[in-house]
Image: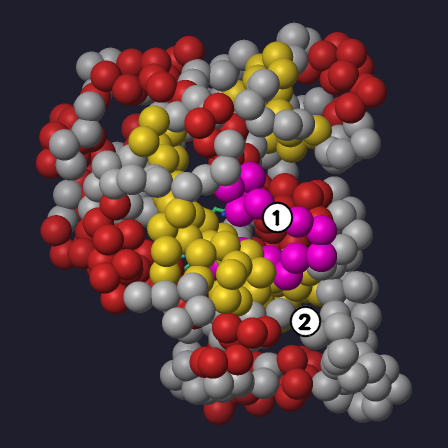
């Protein structure tokens, strides 16, 4: 699926910028000139590994030249208003639409073969697909998102690109998600009742009955273990098939995550999306009063930053000692980025904010605290994105 809205009805952002958005920029001390470059900001595509030799075909299909992004392997820029969803290359799952800054957030994780990766805010899944391509036939990916319909879109994408083999998707709250990565020594009792069999989109009569039972017993979202972590997809080699459900949903002591937790965690947190002008443009249709209600109310922003801190803290809890966590948002506000990072560091002595390898060659600037990065349309010719990378120390 194309990660950018291929909605031809959306016109360029009103010029001058709408008052509500200007007020938001002023309140957050953001330089409005970064949005001046928006109309000239290219789109980006990433090639499915193995399709590199078909560049000329893709150019003919997209009817434009593909410019290699030198600082980001596998990425190409295309003119801003190129439509990709109608192309054959896209429909056949040979190209992905994904912004280069999003690609940078994934690269910052330094994924290596065999890693167990957790993507805590995974939907609709552009970064998760890139993670799956980087892992290839190794390791595992666990994708979590609280929005069922968005995670279902992510599942469709995994199926379209045929990259879900080592992936598990859970509808769950990332602030409380608590499962371990799949273990290679997991029991495989495929024949025993109540173990997980191959995933199918059709639910068995027994599963439907259990779900109904759970629903009637669960007035509170947090009551049942399995309701709390609703597994909506798993691939054949995701480590799930043959597992007993109780083992899959087993709660462990927090200390176990330090040894058996995830090697890499991505927390691409919910935010105000102000760095993504495509998102902001949608308010021309939703109405700027909606923007005002959502983004200019102190209480709502406080709730959002609390959610971001909770997601980051829980992602870090699930990380192995020595593993890497990347926190990213497509907001450019300090409150949702550097402030969240600083508050998190003050509460987590085992967290170390570390530099992103190779970022000195990337088209971005430093954030307002050392080792953090900021992409924006003016500096990077990308959508806006903030990135911070942490490791977990053994203390
Ligand atoms: C910026 S989007 C993630 C984009 C995604 N990483 C990608 O590359 O396509 C943020 C996501 O966080 C999800 N979200 C919001 N609150 C959440 C929570 N408490 N737990 C898990 N996911 C949450 C939203 O549903 C949304 O899909």
Q: Main secondary structure of the magenta part?
A: loop
Quarter of the picture holding the C terminus: bottom left
Horizontally, residue 16 falls left or right of residue 279, namely left
- x and y percent of residue 156 in the render? 67, 50
Segment tinted magenta in the rendering: 106-121
The answer, for residue 277, to whether it is visible in the render is no
Considering only order in the chain, which callout, 2 or 1, is on the residue closer to the N terminus? 1
Identify which residue is drawn at 18% across, 56% down: 302
View extreme (right): residue: 191
Depicted 52 relative to depicted 349: above or below: above
Mark 1–mark 2 CB contact (< 8 Å) = no
Q: Name the residue under label 2.
A: 182
Horizontally, residue 296 falls left or right of residue 73, namely left
Identify which residue is drawn at 12% across, 51% down: 298
Q: Name the residue under label 1.
A: 111
Q: Quadrant of residue 185?
A: bottom right
Identify which residue is drawn at 75% across, 80% down: 186
């Amino acid at each position: 699926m194309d990660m950018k809205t291929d909605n031809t009805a959306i016109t360029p952002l009103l010029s001058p910028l709408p008052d509500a958005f200007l007020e938001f920029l002023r309140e957050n001390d953001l330089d409005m000139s970064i949005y001046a470059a928006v109309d000239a900001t290219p789109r980006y595509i990433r090639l499915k590994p193995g399709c590199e030799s078909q560049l000329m075909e893709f150019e003919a299909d997209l009817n434009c030249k593909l410019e290699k992004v030198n600082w980001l392997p596998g990425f190409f820029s295309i003119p801003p208003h190129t439509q990709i969803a109608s192309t054959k290359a896209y429909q056949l799952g040979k190209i992905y639409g994904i912004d280069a800054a999003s690609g940078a957030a994934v690269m910052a994780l330094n994924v290596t073969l065999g890693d167990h990766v957790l993507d805590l805010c995974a939907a609709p899944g552009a970064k998760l697909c890139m993670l799956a391509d980087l892992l290839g036939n190794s390791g595992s990916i666990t994708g979590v998102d609280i929005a069922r319909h968005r995670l279902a879109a992510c599942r469709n994408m995994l199926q379209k690109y045929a990259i879900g083999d080592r992936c598990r998707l859970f509808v769950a709250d990332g602030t409380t998600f608590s499962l371990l990565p799949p273990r290679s020594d997991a029991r495989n009792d495929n024949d025993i009742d109540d173990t997980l069999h191959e995933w199918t989109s059709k639910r068995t009569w027994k599963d439907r009955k259990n779900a109904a039972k759970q629903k009637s017993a669960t007035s509170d979202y947090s009551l049942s273990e399995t309701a709390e972590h609703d597994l909506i997809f798993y691939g054949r080699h995701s480590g799930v098939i043959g597992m007993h459900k109780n083992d899959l949903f087993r709660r462990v002591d927090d200390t176990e995550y330090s040894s058996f937790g995830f090697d890499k965690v991505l927390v691409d947190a919910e935010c105000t999306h102000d760095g993504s002008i495509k998102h902001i443009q949608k308010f021309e249709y939703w109405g700027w009063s909606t923007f005002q209600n959502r983004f200019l109310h102190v209480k709502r922003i406080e709730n959002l930053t609390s959610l971001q801190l909770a997601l980051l803290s829980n992602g870090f809890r699930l990380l192995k000692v020595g593993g890497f966590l990347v926190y990213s948002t497509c907001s450019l506000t300090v409150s949702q980025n550097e402030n969240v990072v600083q508050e998190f560091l003050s509460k987590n002595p085992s967290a170390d904010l570390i530099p992103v390898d190779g970022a000195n060659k990337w088209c971005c600037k430093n954030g307002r605290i050392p080792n953090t990065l900021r992409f924006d349309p003016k500096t990077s010719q990308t959508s806006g994105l903030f990135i911070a990378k942490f490791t977990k120390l053994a203390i």
